[in-house]
Amino acid sequence: MTHSALDAPALDQLFRQARTYNAFSGDVSDQTLRELYDLVKFGPTTANASPARFVFVRSPEGKARLEPALSEGNHDKTMSAPVTVIVAYDLAFYEKLPVLFPHVDAKAWFEGQPETELTTVALRNSSLQGAYLILAARALGLDCGPMSGFDNAKVDAAFFAGTQIRSNFLVNLGHGDPTSIFARSPRLGFDEACRIE
């Protein structure tokens, strides 16, 4: 199957004009969150392991549980965002492999491995899935504010106690306030970041 390149407005929406917002408005419905995940789940991961777990924090009760973990600089924008996504990873991701990767015994590749090894795989792939979430949200017309300024241990205690799930990063979702963004920071040019061999 041959695919054509996306047009310039689509590339602008996903990349060139997309920004990290610090204030949001609007509402994000359950249906939109389901549509969002239904896009994210198709992104590739190691052995289709899909270790990311997403908590869509929207209720006042959920925000109150998240609040103590937030850094001062991320507090107000997160508490006022319509939805904050906890992008997390499941260290027991291999338990799902008989369903997700059924043609070989991929579970045996990971079960019994040291936690450091499992963390490497789960963190890498949940980071990929978190990036897919950002692009999928933009594709659905939402704006994003990804961040890492929070206490992971407090989030894990509040949302994942007694499980093998650990937090990775947060993403605020909604309709971004253009007055809340900073001037775009520079990016590395091709020759600084890349080489062709």
Image: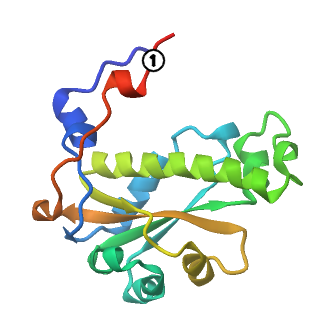
**Location of residue 22 in the rendering, given as x and y in whole percent from the top left corner:** 24, 66
**Location of residue 155 in the rendering, given as x and y in whole percent from the top left corner:** 55, 77
Q: Quadrant of residue 73?
A: bottom left
Q: Quadrant of residue 12?
A: top left
Task: Describe residue 89's horizontal placement relative to residue 106 as left or right.
Answer: left
Above or below, 44 against 161 in this view is: above
Judged from the image, the secondary structure of the residue bearing numbered disc 1 is loop
Task: Describe residue 3's horizontal placement relative to residue 167 as left or right.
Answer: left
Front residue (pair 192, 19): 192
Above or below, 161 against 143 in this view is: below
Front residue (pair 24, 103): 24
Disc 1 marks a residue whose amino acid type is Arg
- Classify the position of the N terminus by image quarter: top left
Above or below, 42 against 4 in this view is: below
- The colour style of the image is rainbow
**Mark 1, residue position:** 195
**Location of residue 91 in the rendering, given as x and y in whole percent from the top left corner:** 72, 60
Task: Describe residue 25's horizontal placement relative to residue 6 as left or right.
Answer: left
The answer to whether residue 64 of the structure is visible from this angle is yes
Q: Residue at x 38, y 77 (%)?
A: 58
Seen as rendered, the residue at the extreme left is 179
The answer to whether residue 78 of the structure is visible from this angle is no
Classify mark 1: residues with Cα within 10 Å, few (<14), some (14-19) or many (20+): few
Q: Residue at x 37, y 19 (%)?
A: 3
Seen as rendered, the residue at the extreme front is 192
Q: Quadrant of residue 10?
A: top left
Front residue (pair 151, 10): 151
**Location of residue 114 in the rendering, given as x and y in whole percent from the top left corner:** 84, 55
Above or below, 18 against 87 in this view is: above
The number of numbered discs placed on residues in the rendered structure image is 1
Q: Residue at x 46, y 13 (%)?
A: 196
